[in-house]
Amino acid sequence: MNRARYIMIGGFLGAGKTTTIGKFAHWLTAKGLKVGLITNDQGSGLVDSALGRAGRFSVEEIPGGCFCCRFDSLTEAAGRLTDATKPDVFLAEPVGSCTDLVATVSYPLQQIYGDHYCVAPLSVLVDPIRAMRVLGLETGKKFSKNVHYIYRKQLEEAENIVINKIDLVSAEQLALLRKGLSERFPEARIFEQSAREETHLEEWFQSVLESEMKDPHFLDIDYQRYGEGEALLGWLNCAVELEGDEEVDGNDLLAELAEELRTAISDAGGTVAHLKMTLTPLGDPYEIGAVNLTRDDGKPELSHHLLEPILDGEILLNMRVEMAPDALEDVAQKALRNVLTAKHALAFRTTHAEHFRPGMPMPTHRMSPPA
């Protein structure tokens, strides 16, 4: 039986997973392989799904919990993609605040559905600046200790650690980070790349395409501490429709709104894990602009650009911030009013909104390593 390859790409919020997966999907397509994307979040209305569909890939979205807690939904999503397009490769992106994915997702998938899927080793992406701060190699604003606990556990279970965004750091910083990761996680294979700049991608792409999980890293993990770490993060997903009497530059609009949100979150004492937002003209999901913010002291960066000014559109906003969810909702609505209405005279209405803290993770399966 020809088995589809299942490649899960983890990493903390803001590591560049979605951008990397998009580049990987195009690379696979160029090789003549069919690709199916599986996105995942604690809520619904995902920027990741919108970006995948804008790239004209088949996408299944699993909301309401991580793959570990929605394992049956994961296999059902893969089945729907198989029925629709028969992908050769599934690229799956778990929630960025989740860990223990080997014992709860990769290994159960291999053991229960091994006749259908060839499961690749788990890869975990890292943002080099955040990684250096978490590992104590560089100073800067940090998350709470239990959030850092999740971050380190993600690295501990990785067979492949992928240092992404290497264009953001010097050669000296990169060497320091690589040394720090090698010393702390000696069993992992380390890659260096920049998905945004499309540099040094192929070595890792080829490796995970050709390899199968044979030496999984099972975690000794404190689920109480893990759950408390996730619960420190406020989650907000919302969708907003806007329209105006005159055309506006949608790319500038996204950048202004992201900067307004960054300032407001910082003023309120929050710590940004990841803020991402898309803007599409109404009725045209393939024309898309997208902006990302991954640190309080960073600048919003456009990853996708709208080609023409717009009269109307839909904004999808996903924010993960160490901050109370109610306060995060207030920040979002105020920023939307300040930028869309006050600055650009745009009318807008919120069509979907949810804000919450993730619940305690309760995996469908948690398998132990073989004796």
Image (tube, rainbow, N blue to C red):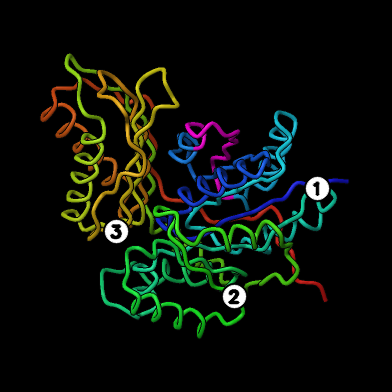
**Mark 2 or mark 3, which is nearer the start of the sequence?**
2
Asked whether 168 or 62 is in front, the reply is: 168
| Secondary structure of the residue carrying numbered label 1 | loop
Q: Which of label 3 and label 1 is nearer to you?
A: 1
- The residue segment tinted magenta is 52-66
Image quarter (top left, top right, bottom left or bottom right) of the C terminus: bottom right
The residue drawn where x is 75% and y is 30% is 83
Left or right: where 147 falls relative to 244:
right
Checking the image for residue 188, the label placed there is 2
The residue drawn where x is 32% and y is 31% is 306
Residue furthest out toward the top: 245
Checking the image for residue 3, the label placed there is 1
On screen, residue 144 above or below 210: below
Asked whether 154 or 312 is in front, the reply is: 312
Find residue 226 and report its horizontal and vertical position in percent: 51, 65
Query: Would you call the spot at circle 2 few (<14 residues within 10 Å), some (14-19), or many (20 or more)?
Result: many
